[in-house]
Amino acid sequence: MERTAVLARLTWQPATLQAVHPETPTARTLTLAVPGWEGHQPGQHLDLRLTAAGGYTAQRAYSIGSAPAAETVKLTVEVTPGGEVSPFLAHMAHPGVRVEVRGPLGGWFVWSPNEAGPVQLIGGGSGVVPLMSMLRTHRAIGHRAPMRLLYSVRSPDALLFAGELTAGDQVGAADHVTVVYSRQAPSGDLRGPGRVDAADIATHVLAAEDSPKCFVCGPTPFVEAVNELLGRAGHDLHQIRAERFGTGRT
Amino acid sequence: MNVVSEGFSGRQQAPGVNLLPPGQYLTRDFPVLSAGPTPKVDRRVWEFSIVTETGQEHHWDFASLLELGPEQIDIDLHCVTGWSKLATRWGGVPVEALLRAVGSTTAQHVLARSYGGYTTNVPLADLLHGQAWLAYEYDGAPLTPEHGGPVRLLIPHLYLWKSAKWLRQLDLTGASQPGFWERLGYHSYGDPWKEQRYWRD
Amino acid sequence: MTETPDFLDGNAAAGDLSQLFGTDMTHVSGPCLGCGQRVVIAQAHTFLGGPGTVLRCPGCDTVLLRMVRSPERIWLETSGMGYLEFVNHP
Protein backbone atom coordinates (compact mmCIF):
# COMPACT_ATOMS: atom_id res chain seq x y z
CA MET A 1 0.00 0.00 0.00
CA GLU A 2 1.22 3.50 -0.79
CA ARG A 3 2.93 4.99 2.26
CA THR A 4 1.10 8.31 2.30
CA ALA A 5 -2.25 6.55 2.23
CA VAL A 6 -1.24 4.45 5.25
CA LEU A 7 -0.10 7.49 7.24
CA ALA A 8 -3.31 9.39 6.53
CA ARG A 9 -5.33 6.65 8.15
CA LEU A 10 -3.28 6.69 11.35
CA THR A 11 -4.10 10.26 12.33
CA TRP A 12 -7.36 11.56 13.67
CA GLN A 13 -9.97 12.50 11.13
CA PRO A 14 -13.40 14.04 11.60
CA ALA A 15 -16.53 11.94 11.31
CA THR A 16 -20.23 12.60 11.73
CA LEU A 17 -22.85 10.38 13.26
CA GLN A 18 -25.21 9.71 10.40
CA ALA A 19 -27.75 7.28 11.84
CA VAL A 20 -28.51 5.27 14.94
CA HIS A 21 -30.29 1.94 15.15
CA PRO A 22 -31.29 0.37 18.47
CA GLU A 23 -30.20 -3.24 18.89
CA THR A 24 -31.24 -3.85 22.50
CA PRO A 25 -32.37 -1.70 25.42
CA THR A 26 -28.69 -1.03 26.18
CA ALA A 27 -26.99 -1.13 22.79
CA ARG A 28 -27.30 0.51 19.45
CA THR A 29 -25.53 0.57 16.13
CA LEU A 30 -24.06 3.86 15.01
CA THR A 31 -23.44 4.64 11.37
CA LEU A 32 -20.60 7.13 10.97
CA ALA A 33 -19.94 9.11 7.83
CA VAL A 34 -16.16 9.41 7.47
CA PRO A 35 -15.03 11.51 4.50
CA GLY A 36 -12.17 9.79 2.71
CA TRP A 37 -12.59 6.47 4.51
CA GLU A 38 -11.40 3.74 2.19
CA GLY A 39 -12.74 0.69 3.94
CA HIS A 40 -11.23 -1.85 6.29
CA GLN A 41 -10.41 -5.52 6.67
CA PRO A 42 -13.03 -7.56 8.57
CA GLY A 43 -11.96 -7.71 12.21
CA GLN A 44 -10.32 -4.31 12.37
CA HIS A 45 -11.32 -1.57 14.75
CA LEU A 46 -11.01 2.16 15.00
CA ASP A 47 -10.26 4.56 17.82
CA LEU A 48 -13.01 7.09 18.45
CA ARG A 49 -12.41 10.37 20.26
CA LEU A 50 -14.96 12.65 21.86
CA THR A 51 -14.21 16.23 22.85
CA ALA A 52 -16.26 18.23 25.32
CA ALA A 53 -16.60 21.97 25.02
CA GLY A 54 -13.57 23.21 26.95
CA GLY A 55 -11.27 20.57 25.53
CA TYR A 56 -11.69 17.51 27.77
CA THR A 57 -11.26 14.41 25.61
CA ALA A 58 -11.92 10.73 25.96
CA GLN A 59 -11.13 8.02 23.46
CA ARG A 60 -12.08 4.37 23.12
CA ALA A 61 -11.48 1.61 20.63
CA TYR A 62 -14.54 0.20 18.83
CA SER A 63 -14.66 -2.76 16.50
CA ILE A 64 -16.15 -2.15 13.07
CA GLY A 65 -19.25 -4.30 12.61
CA SER A 66 -20.04 -3.49 8.99
CA ALA A 67 -18.57 -5.14 5.94
CA PRO A 68 -15.90 -2.99 4.26
CA ALA A 69 -17.25 0.07 2.50
CA ALA A 70 -16.03 3.50 1.48
CA GLU A 71 -17.12 6.61 3.40
CA THR A 72 -19.09 4.87 6.16
CA VAL A 73 -18.55 2.50 9.08
CA LYS A 74 -20.90 0.95 11.58
CA LEU A 75 -20.03 0.48 15.22
CA THR A 76 -22.20 -1.17 17.87
CA VAL A 77 -21.91 0.29 21.36
CA GLU A 78 -23.13 -1.46 24.49
CA VAL A 79 -23.64 0.67 27.60
CA THR A 80 -21.44 -0.22 30.53
CA PRO A 81 -22.93 1.27 33.72
CA GLY A 82 -20.84 4.08 35.14
CA GLY A 83 -18.95 4.41 31.91
CA GLU A 84 -18.04 7.78 30.53
CA VAL A 85 -18.14 7.24 26.78
CA SER A 86 -20.57 4.37 26.22
CA PRO A 87 -23.63 6.03 27.80
CA PHE A 88 -23.09 9.03 25.55
CA LEU A 89 -22.74 6.96 22.39
CA ALA A 90 -25.41 4.39 23.21
CA HIS A 91 -28.09 6.74 24.56
CA MET A 92 -27.43 10.42 23.99
CA ALA A 93 -25.57 11.09 20.77
CA HIS A 94 -27.90 12.03 17.93
CA PRO A 95 -27.31 12.15 14.18
CA GLY A 96 -25.22 15.19 13.40
CA VAL A 97 -22.89 14.82 16.37
CA ARG A 98 -19.29 15.19 15.35
CA VAL A 99 -16.51 12.89 16.55
CA GLU A 100 -13.02 11.95 15.45
CA VAL A 101 -11.80 8.54 14.37
CA ARG A 102 -8.41 6.98 13.78
CA GLY A 103 -8.01 3.84 11.74
CA PRO A 104 -8.69 1.26 10.58
CA LEU A 105 -6.43 -0.41 13.10
CA GLY A 106 -5.13 -3.89 13.72
CA GLY A 107 -3.75 -6.14 11.01
CA TRP A 108 -3.59 -9.33 13.04
CA PHE A 109 -7.16 -9.96 14.18
CA VAL A 110 -8.35 -9.96 10.58
CA TRP A 111 -10.10 -12.43 8.26
CA SER A 112 -9.30 -11.97 4.62
CA PRO A 113 -11.73 -13.23 1.95
CA ASN A 114 -8.61 -14.41 0.08
CA GLU A 115 -8.38 -17.24 2.57
CA ALA A 116 -10.03 -20.42 1.43
CA GLY A 117 -10.08 -22.37 4.69
CA PRO A 118 -12.92 -22.91 7.15
CA VAL A 119 -13.48 -20.27 9.83
CA GLN A 120 -14.85 -20.56 13.35
CA LEU A 121 -16.01 -17.36 15.04
CA ILE A 122 -16.69 -17.35 18.79
CA GLY A 123 -18.01 -14.18 20.38
CA GLY A 124 -19.14 -13.21 23.85
CA GLY A 125 -21.46 -10.24 24.31
CA SER A 126 -20.26 -7.24 22.31
CA GLY A 127 -17.30 -9.37 21.20
CA VAL A 128 -19.55 -10.45 18.36
CA VAL A 129 -19.15 -7.06 16.64
CA PRO A 130 -15.86 -7.63 14.76
CA LEU A 131 -17.04 -11.16 13.99
CA MET A 132 -20.15 -9.66 12.36
CA SER A 133 -17.89 -7.76 9.99
CA MET A 134 -16.39 -11.11 8.99
CA LEU A 135 -19.77 -12.82 8.68
CA ARG A 136 -21.34 -9.97 6.73
CA THR A 137 -18.39 -9.88 4.34
CA HIS A 138 -18.55 -13.65 3.92
CA ARG A 139 -22.25 -13.44 3.07
CA ALA A 140 -21.98 -10.37 0.86
CA ILE A 141 -19.45 -11.97 -1.47
CA GLY A 142 -20.95 -15.48 -1.34
CA HIS A 143 -17.74 -16.94 0.05
CA ARG A 144 -17.93 -20.75 -0.12
CA ALA A 145 -15.66 -21.75 2.77
CA PRO A 146 -17.58 -22.90 5.85
CA MET A 147 -17.94 -20.16 8.47
CA ARG A 148 -19.57 -20.81 11.80
CA LEU A 149 -20.41 -18.38 14.56
CA LEU A 150 -20.91 -19.43 18.17
CA TYR A 151 -22.33 -16.40 19.96
CA SER A 152 -22.71 -16.39 23.72
CA VAL A 153 -25.03 -13.74 25.09
CA ARG A 154 -26.43 -13.03 28.54
CA SER A 155 -30.13 -13.26 27.68
CA PRO A 156 -32.46 -13.00 24.68
CA ASP A 157 -32.90 -9.25 25.13
CA ALA A 158 -29.13 -8.75 24.95
CA LEU A 159 -28.88 -10.34 21.50
CA LEU A 160 -27.22 -8.00 19.00
CA PHE A 161 -27.99 -8.15 15.26
CA ALA A 162 -31.00 -10.33 16.04
CA GLY A 163 -32.52 -9.80 12.62
CA GLU A 164 -29.47 -11.23 10.87
CA LEU A 165 -28.60 -14.04 13.20
CA THR A 166 -31.53 -16.36 12.78
CA ALA A 167 -30.61 -19.68 14.30
CA GLY A 168 -29.70 -22.45 11.93
CA ASP A 169 -28.73 -22.37 8.29
CA GLN A 170 -30.00 -19.99 5.73
CA VAL A 171 -30.83 -21.84 2.51
CA GLY A 172 -27.71 -22.10 0.40
CA ALA A 173 -25.54 -20.27 2.87
CA ALA A 174 -22.07 -21.52 3.71
CA ASP A 175 -22.38 -20.14 7.24
CA HIS A 176 -24.08 -21.33 10.38
CA VAL A 177 -24.91 -19.38 13.52
CA THR A 178 -25.52 -20.80 17.00
CA VAL A 179 -26.60 -18.59 19.87
CA VAL A 180 -26.14 -19.78 23.44
CA TYR A 181 -27.30 -17.99 26.55
CA SER A 182 -25.19 -17.58 29.65
CA ARG A 183 -27.69 -16.31 32.25
CA GLN A 184 -31.22 -16.54 30.94
CA ALA A 185 -32.35 -18.65 28.03
CA PRO A 186 -35.62 -18.35 26.09
CA SER A 187 -38.34 -20.81 27.06
CA GLY A 188 -38.04 -23.96 25.01
CA ASP A 189 -34.28 -23.64 24.71
CA LEU A 190 -33.04 -27.19 25.33
CA ARG A 191 -29.49 -26.22 26.27
CA GLY A 192 -30.55 -23.89 29.10
CA PRO A 193 -28.48 -21.01 30.40
CA GLY A 194 -24.78 -21.45 31.13
CA ARG A 195 -21.32 -20.35 30.09
CA VAL A 196 -19.70 -21.83 27.00
CA ASP A 197 -18.31 -25.24 27.93
CA ALA A 198 -16.66 -28.28 26.38
CA ALA A 199 -20.02 -29.69 25.25
CA ASP A 200 -20.75 -26.48 23.32
CA ILE A 201 -17.36 -26.70 21.63
CA ALA A 202 -17.93 -30.34 20.71
CA THR A 203 -21.44 -29.68 19.39
CA HIS A 204 -21.18 -26.35 17.61
CA VAL A 205 -17.56 -25.67 16.73
CA LEU A 206 -15.80 -26.91 13.61
CA ALA A 207 -13.64 -29.92 14.35
CA ALA A 208 -9.97 -29.42 15.11
CA GLU A 209 -9.12 -31.87 12.28
CA ASP A 210 -10.57 -29.38 9.80
CA SER A 211 -7.93 -26.87 10.91
CA PRO A 212 -10.30 -23.94 11.03
CA LYS A 213 -8.97 -20.48 11.66
CA CYS A 214 -10.61 -19.44 14.94
CA PHE A 215 -11.45 -15.89 15.90
CA VAL A 216 -12.39 -15.40 19.55
CA CYS A 217 -13.59 -12.05 20.86
CA GLY A 218 -15.24 -10.77 24.00
CA PRO A 219 -14.46 -9.84 27.59
CA THR A 220 -11.05 -11.04 28.75
CA PRO A 221 -12.36 -13.83 31.02
CA PHE A 222 -14.54 -15.15 28.17
CA VAL A 223 -11.61 -15.20 25.75
CA GLU A 224 -9.31 -16.91 28.24
CA ALA A 225 -11.92 -19.58 28.97
CA VAL A 226 -12.73 -20.22 25.30
CA ASN A 227 -9.07 -20.41 24.30
CA GLU A 228 -8.55 -23.00 27.01
CA LEU A 229 -11.53 -25.02 25.75
CA LEU A 230 -10.35 -24.86 22.14
CA GLY A 231 -6.91 -26.01 23.18
CA ARG A 232 -8.37 -28.98 25.06
CA ALA A 233 -10.49 -29.83 22.01
CA GLY A 234 -7.31 -30.20 20.00
CA HIS A 235 -7.21 -26.90 18.14
CA ASP A 236 -3.75 -25.65 17.24
CA LEU A 237 -3.16 -22.49 19.27
CA HIS A 238 -1.47 -20.90 16.27
CA GLN A 239 -4.79 -21.10 14.43
CA ILE A 240 -6.57 -19.08 17.13
CA ARG A 241 -6.67 -15.29 17.01
CA ALA A 242 -8.17 -13.45 19.95
CA GLU A 243 -9.24 -9.94 20.79
CA ARG A 244 -9.96 -9.12 24.41
CA PHE A 245 -12.37 -6.42 25.47
CA GLY A 246 -11.90 -5.20 29.00
CA THR A 247 -14.25 -6.03 31.81
CA GLY A 248 -13.95 -2.48 33.05
CA ARG A 249 -16.08 0.57 32.56
CA THR A 250 -16.18 2.39 29.27
CA MET B 1 -7.69 21.01 16.48
CA ASN B 2 -10.34 18.66 17.82
CA VAL B 3 -13.92 18.77 16.70
CA VAL B 4 -16.33 19.20 19.62
CA SER B 5 -18.75 16.34 20.25
CA GLU B 6 -21.99 18.10 21.08
CA GLY B 7 -23.52 16.94 24.34
CA PHE B 8 -20.46 15.05 25.66
CA SER B 9 -19.08 16.05 29.02
CA GLY B 10 -17.38 12.89 30.25
CA ARG B 11 -16.33 12.08 33.74
CA GLN B 12 -15.48 15.60 34.78
CA GLN B 13 -17.56 17.41 37.36
CA ALA B 14 -18.84 20.95 36.93
CA PRO B 15 -16.15 23.60 36.54
CA GLY B 16 -15.64 26.28 39.12
CA VAL B 17 -13.91 24.17 41.73
CA ASN B 18 -10.76 25.99 42.81
CA LEU B 19 -9.31 23.30 45.04
CA LEU B 20 -7.64 21.52 42.15
CA PRO B 21 -4.08 21.66 40.90
CA PRO B 22 -3.67 23.04 37.38
CA GLY B 23 -4.90 20.80 34.58
CA GLN B 24 -6.88 18.46 36.82
CA TYR B 25 -10.56 17.64 36.74
CA LEU B 26 -12.70 16.47 39.59
CA THR B 27 -14.14 12.96 39.63
CA ARG B 28 -16.40 11.08 42.03
CA ASP B 29 -15.21 7.72 40.71
CA PHE B 30 -12.08 6.04 41.93
CA PRO B 31 -10.45 4.84 38.73
CA VAL B 32 -8.27 1.78 38.98
CA LEU B 33 -5.23 2.10 36.76
CA SER B 34 -2.43 -0.38 36.72
CA ALA B 35 0.77 -1.25 34.92
CA GLY B 36 0.30 -4.95 35.41
CA PRO B 37 -1.69 -7.75 36.97
CA THR B 38 -3.00 -7.10 40.46
CA PRO B 39 -0.93 -8.88 43.09
CA LYS B 40 -3.01 -10.84 45.57
CA VAL B 41 -1.13 -10.75 48.85
CA ASP B 42 -2.99 -11.74 51.99
CA ARG B 43 -2.45 -9.61 55.11
CA ARG B 44 -1.25 -12.71 56.90
CA VAL B 45 1.66 -13.24 54.51
CA TRP B 46 2.46 -9.59 53.73
CA GLU B 47 6.02 -8.59 54.58
CA PHE B 48 7.60 -5.18 54.48
CA SER B 49 11.25 -4.14 54.70
CA ILE B 50 13.25 -0.97 54.92
CA VAL B 51 16.75 -1.48 53.54
CA THR B 52 19.29 1.18 54.40
CA GLU B 53 22.10 2.49 52.20
CA THR B 54 24.48 0.19 54.09
CA GLY B 55 22.35 -2.88 53.41
CA GLN B 56 20.86 -3.14 56.89
CA GLU B 57 17.36 -4.56 56.81
CA HIS B 58 14.40 -3.92 59.06
CA HIS B 59 11.29 -6.07 58.75
CA TRP B 60 7.63 -5.80 59.63
CA ASP B 61 4.63 -8.00 59.15
CA PHE B 62 1.04 -6.78 59.27
CA ALA B 63 0.64 -7.32 63.01
CA SER B 64 3.79 -5.37 63.84
CA LEU B 65 2.65 -2.59 61.49
CA LEU B 66 -0.62 -2.24 63.41
CA GLU B 67 1.30 -1.85 66.67
CA LEU B 68 2.83 1.41 65.46
CA GLY B 69 -0.21 3.55 66.09
CA PRO B 70 -2.62 3.83 63.17
CA GLU B 71 -4.33 7.11 62.38
CA GLN B 72 -7.12 8.42 60.20
CA ILE B 73 -5.93 10.07 57.02
CA ASP B 74 -8.13 12.55 55.09
CA ILE B 75 -6.55 13.53 51.83
CA ASP B 76 -7.07 14.56 48.22
CA LEU B 77 -5.70 12.43 45.41
CA HIS B 78 -4.25 13.85 42.18
CA CYS B 79 -3.47 11.45 39.36
CA VAL B 80 -1.14 12.53 36.58
CA THR B 81 -3.68 11.24 34.04
CA GLY B 82 -5.84 14.21 35.01
CA TRP B 83 -8.38 13.14 37.59
CA SER B 84 -8.51 14.35 41.17
CA LYS B 85 -10.60 12.87 43.93
CA LEU B 86 -11.12 14.99 47.00
CA ALA B 87 -11.73 14.14 50.64
CA THR B 88 -10.77 10.48 50.60
CA ARG B 89 -10.46 8.72 53.92
CA TRP B 90 -7.80 6.16 54.68
CA GLY B 91 -6.36 4.41 57.72
CA GLY B 92 -2.68 3.81 58.15
CA VAL B 93 0.62 4.43 59.87
CA PRO B 94 2.92 7.42 59.22
CA VAL B 95 6.06 6.35 57.39
CA GLU B 96 8.22 8.08 60.00
CA ALA B 97 6.94 5.67 62.65
CA LEU B 98 8.77 2.93 60.75
CA LEU B 99 11.75 5.07 59.91
CA ARG B 100 12.30 5.57 63.63
CA ALA B 101 13.32 1.91 63.83
CA VAL B 102 16.03 2.55 61.28
CA GLY B 103 17.74 5.20 63.34
CA SER B 104 20.15 7.51 61.65
CA THR B 105 20.83 7.45 57.94
CA THR B 106 22.83 9.50 55.48
CA ALA B 107 20.46 8.55 52.67
CA GLN B 108 18.48 11.38 51.15
CA HIS B 109 16.39 9.39 48.68
CA VAL B 110 14.05 6.45 48.74
CA LEU B 111 13.08 3.88 46.14
CA ALA B 112 9.71 2.28 46.92
CA ARG B 113 9.24 -1.28 45.68
CA SER B 114 5.96 -3.08 45.18
CA TYR B 115 4.88 -6.67 44.92
CA GLY B 116 4.76 -7.27 41.16
CA GLY B 117 7.86 -5.18 40.45
CA TYR B 118 6.64 -1.59 40.32
CA THR B 119 9.01 1.05 41.66
CA THR B 120 8.92 4.79 42.26
CA ASN B 121 11.36 7.22 43.83
CA VAL B 122 10.86 10.05 46.32
CA PRO B 123 13.16 12.24 48.44
CA LEU B 124 13.37 10.92 52.01
CA ALA B 125 12.34 14.32 53.35
CA ASP B 126 8.97 13.97 51.58
CA LEU B 127 8.16 10.90 53.67
CA LEU B 128 8.57 12.75 56.98
CA HIS B 129 6.59 15.28 59.02
CA GLY B 130 3.15 13.85 58.44
CA GLN B 131 3.44 13.84 54.67
CA ALA B 132 3.30 10.10 54.00
CA TRP B 133 1.74 6.89 55.27
CA LEU B 134 1.60 3.17 54.86
CA ALA B 135 -2.17 2.83 54.35
CA TYR B 136 -4.18 -0.38 54.81
CA GLU B 137 -7.74 0.90 55.04
CA TYR B 138 -9.84 2.86 52.61
CA ASP B 139 -13.31 4.21 53.32
CA GLY B 140 -13.49 2.33 56.59
CA ALA B 141 -12.74 -1.11 55.14
CA PRO B 142 -9.58 -3.13 54.53
CA LEU B 143 -7.77 -1.84 51.47
CA THR B 144 -8.67 -4.03 48.49
CA PRO B 145 -6.07 -5.40 46.06
CA GLU B 146 -7.34 -3.26 43.20
CA HIS B 147 -6.52 -0.11 45.17
CA GLY B 148 -3.17 -1.39 46.34
CA GLY B 149 -3.98 -3.58 49.33
CA PRO B 150 -3.01 -5.00 51.69
CA VAL B 151 -0.70 -2.00 52.20
CA ARG B 152 0.15 0.91 49.93
CA LEU B 153 2.20 4.05 50.21
CA LEU B 154 0.33 7.35 50.34
CA ILE B 155 2.10 10.61 49.54
CA PRO B 156 -0.77 13.01 48.80
CA HIS B 157 1.32 16.09 48.07
CA LEU B 158 2.77 14.36 45.00
CA TYR B 159 1.02 12.85 41.97
CA LEU B 160 -0.60 9.54 42.77
CA TRP B 161 1.89 7.40 40.80
CA LYS B 162 4.29 8.06 43.69
CA SER B 163 1.86 6.40 46.12
CA ALA B 164 3.06 2.91 45.34
CA LYS B 165 0.43 0.20 45.60
CA TRP B 166 1.17 -3.27 47.00
CA LEU B 167 4.10 -1.84 48.96
CA ARG B 168 6.80 -4.34 49.87
CA GLN B 169 9.99 -2.42 50.53
CA LEU B 170 11.64 0.97 50.85
CA ASP B 171 15.29 1.28 49.84
CA LEU B 172 17.15 4.22 51.37
CA THR B 173 19.62 5.43 48.79
CA GLY B 174 22.35 8.03 48.52
CA ALA B 175 21.47 9.14 45.03
CA SER B 176 18.03 9.36 43.51
CA GLN B 177 17.17 6.20 41.58
CA PRO B 178 14.40 6.72 39.02
CA GLY B 179 11.52 4.28 39.27
CA PHE B 180 9.27 2.60 36.72
CA TRP B 181 7.67 5.72 35.26
CA GLU B 182 10.46 8.15 36.12
CA ARG B 183 12.68 6.24 33.73
CA LEU B 184 10.32 6.80 30.82
CA GLY B 185 9.31 10.44 30.76
CA TYR B 186 7.71 11.14 34.11
CA HIS B 187 9.03 13.87 36.37
CA SER B 188 11.43 12.80 39.09
CA TYR B 189 9.62 14.78 41.82
CA GLY B 190 6.00 15.15 40.64
CA ASP B 191 4.46 18.16 42.42
CA PRO B 192 0.91 18.52 41.07
CA TRP B 193 0.69 22.16 42.16
CA LYS B 194 3.61 22.97 39.87
CA GLU B 195 2.22 20.60 37.27
CA GLN B 196 5.42 18.53 37.23
CA ARG B 197 4.11 15.68 35.10
CA TYR B 198 6.95 14.97 32.66
CA TRP B 199 10.68 15.49 32.30
CA ARG B 200 11.60 19.17 31.77
CA ASP B 201 8.29 20.36 33.22
CA MET C 1 -17.86 3.65 42.54
CA THR C 2 -14.71 1.63 41.98
CA GLU C 3 -13.72 0.57 38.51
CA THR C 4 -11.84 -2.54 37.47
CA PRO C 5 -8.60 -2.24 35.50
CA ASP C 6 -8.76 -3.16 31.86
CA PHE C 7 -6.66 -6.22 31.12
CA LEU C 8 -6.62 -6.10 27.35
CA ASP C 9 -4.40 -7.37 24.59
CA GLY C 10 -2.12 -5.64 22.13
CA ASN C 11 -5.00 -5.00 19.73
CA ALA C 12 -6.07 -2.23 22.11
CA ALA C 13 -2.72 -0.46 21.73
CA ALA C 14 -2.89 -0.64 17.92
CA GLY C 15 -3.82 3.02 17.48
CA ASP C 16 -1.00 4.58 19.48
CA LEU C 17 1.66 2.11 18.34
CA SER C 18 0.64 2.18 14.70
CA GLN C 19 0.56 5.95 14.63
CA LEU C 20 4.09 6.02 16.04
CA PHE C 21 5.53 3.46 13.63
CA GLY C 22 3.46 4.44 10.63
CA THR C 23 2.35 0.88 10.07
CA ASP C 24 0.28 -1.79 11.77
CA MET C 25 2.07 -3.08 14.84
CA THR C 26 -0.30 -5.78 16.03
CA HIS C 27 1.27 -8.45 13.83
CA VAL C 28 4.81 -7.61 15.03
CA SER C 29 6.42 -10.31 17.15
CA GLY C 30 9.57 -11.04 19.08
CA PRO C 31 11.06 -13.12 21.90
CA CYS C 32 10.31 -12.26 25.52
CA LEU C 33 13.61 -11.70 27.28
CA GLY C 34 12.09 -13.05 30.48
CA CYS C 35 11.08 -16.52 29.27
CA GLY C 36 12.06 -16.77 25.62
CA GLN C 37 8.47 -17.24 24.40
CA ARG C 38 7.75 -15.69 21.03
CA VAL C 39 5.00 -13.12 21.56
CA VAL C 40 2.84 -11.41 18.95
CA ILE C 41 2.10 -7.82 19.98
CA ALA C 42 -1.62 -8.45 19.42
CA GLN C 43 -1.56 -11.07 22.17
CA ALA C 44 0.52 -9.23 24.76
CA HIS C 45 -1.31 -8.54 28.00
CA THR C 46 -1.96 -4.84 27.76
CA PHE C 47 -2.56 -2.26 30.47
CA LEU C 48 -3.91 1.11 29.37
CA GLY C 49 -5.27 4.18 31.02
CA GLY C 50 -2.53 4.71 33.56
CA PRO C 51 0.48 6.96 33.18
CA GLY C 52 1.47 4.90 30.16
CA THR C 53 0.76 1.86 28.06
CA VAL C 54 2.37 -1.38 29.22
CA LEU C 55 2.56 -4.61 27.24
CA ARG C 56 3.53 -7.77 29.13
CA CYS C 57 4.40 -11.30 28.18
CA PRO C 58 1.32 -13.56 28.44
CA GLY C 59 3.54 -16.31 29.77
CA CYS C 60 5.66 -14.63 32.44
CA ASP C 61 4.37 -11.02 32.80
CA THR C 62 7.74 -9.51 31.90
CA VAL C 63 7.30 -5.98 30.62
CA LEU C 64 7.91 -6.21 26.87
CA LEU C 65 7.17 -2.67 25.81
CA ARG C 66 6.10 0.61 27.41
CA MET C 67 4.94 3.89 25.92
CA VAL C 68 4.37 7.28 27.53
CA ARG C 69 2.81 10.24 25.76
CA SER C 70 3.06 13.86 26.83
CA PRO C 71 1.60 16.75 24.84
CA GLU C 72 4.96 17.21 23.13
CA ARG C 73 6.76 13.88 23.36
CA ILE C 74 6.35 10.15 23.07
CA TRP C 75 8.72 7.80 24.87
CA LEU C 76 8.95 4.17 23.88
CA GLU C 77 11.04 1.42 25.33
CA THR C 78 11.03 -2.15 24.06
CA SER C 79 13.76 -3.59 26.25
CA GLY C 80 11.70 -6.62 27.24
CA MET C 81 11.79 -7.96 23.69
CA GLY C 82 14.90 -9.39 22.13
CA TYR C 83 13.95 -7.90 18.78
CA LEU C 84 10.90 -6.79 16.82
CA GLU C 85 10.07 -8.82 13.75
CA PHE C 86 7.98 -7.07 11.09
CA VAL C 87 6.55 -8.60 7.92
CA ASN C 88 8.42 -7.07 4.99
CA HIS C 89 6.06 -5.86 2.30
CA PRO C 90 8.19 -5.28 -0.80
Image: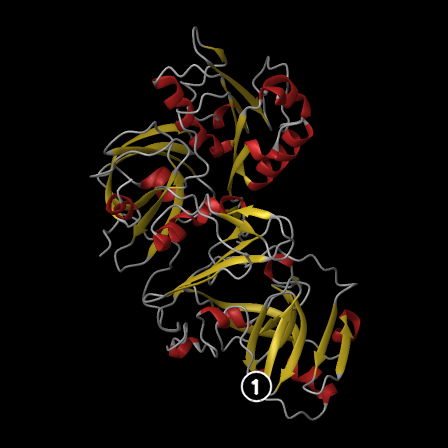
Rendered location of residue A19, percent (x, y): 26, 32
Q: Nearer the viewer, residue A205 or A128?
A: A205
- Please indicate, yes or no, whether residue A205 appears anywhere in the rendered image: yes
Q: Nearer the viewer, residue B10 or A16?
A: A16
Say which residue appears at 60% left-offset and 28% top-offset.
A182
User: Which image quadrant: the C terminus of chain B?
Assistant: bottom left
Q: Nearer the viewer, residue B16 or A95?
A: A95
Q: Nearer the viewer, residue A56 or A41?
A: A41
Say which residue appears at 65% left-offset and 58% top-offset.
B145
**Mark 1, residue position:** B175
Say which residue appears at 39% left-offset and 72% top-offset.
B20
**Vertical placement of residue C54 versus B7, above or below:** below
Q: Image quarter for residue B82?
A: bottom left
Rendered location of residue C45, percent (x, y): 55, 49
Label 1 secondary element: loop
Q: Image quarter for residue A103?
A: top left
Coloring basis for residues = secondary structure
Rendered location of residue A78, percent (x, y): 43, 36
- Please indicate, yes or no, whether residue B67 appears anywhere in the rendered image: no
Chain name for mark 1: B
